[in-house]
Amino acid sequence: MNTKRKVKPKNDPHLYEFHIPGKATLVPGTEVALKGRPGRYRFRYADRPRGDGYRFVLTFVGGPLHGQSDKFVSVYPDRVTRVHRASKTLVNIQKEKTQ
């Protein structure tokens, strides 16, 4: 017989909302500029510190605006130089058009 198993969902270790002091609150899809990296990056999630003395790690996807490929990048919050208000990445522009 084919029976469904009831599996308890795993705890998600990621944070999907992160506040950068003095800048803004990041939610998935928010575009930012990163120090030392060309292009714009979209926020995905933040990882909690793993212990004392550790810091939050933010994960983004994106890169140069020519749209060839998106790269996953994990950085500390102090590497975020600007939080953009207007969307320019192709993925975000396409989402806005369909809504």
Image (tube, grey):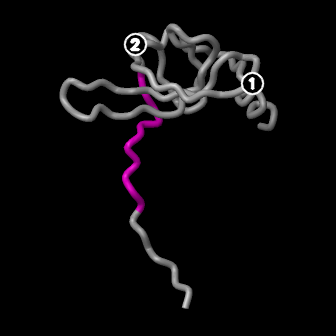
Q: What is the x, y in percent for residue 88?
A: 72, 18
Question: Measuring 41% from the left and 18% from the top, which residue is drawn there?
Answer: 77
**Residues rendered magenta in the picture:** 9-19
Disc assigned to residue 78:
2
Residue placed most toward the observer, 59 or 86: 59
Disc assigned to residue 68:
1
Tell me which amino acid carries mark 1: Gln
The magenta stretch spans residue 15: yes
Tell me which amino acid carries mark 2: Asp
Residue placed most toward the observer, 99 or 81: 81
Q: What is the x, y in percent for residue 41?
A: 59, 21
Element class at badge 1: loop
Seen as rendered, the residue at the extreme left is 52
Question: Measuring 60% from the left and 30% from the top, which residue is drawn there?
Answer: 29
Relative vertical location of residue 14 with respect to residue 91 in this rendering, above or below: below
Q: Main secondary structure of the magenta part?
A: loop
Seen as rendered, the residue at the extreme bottom is 1
For mark 2, does the 10 Å Cα neighbourhood hold few (<14), some (14 to 19), or many (20 or more) residues?
few
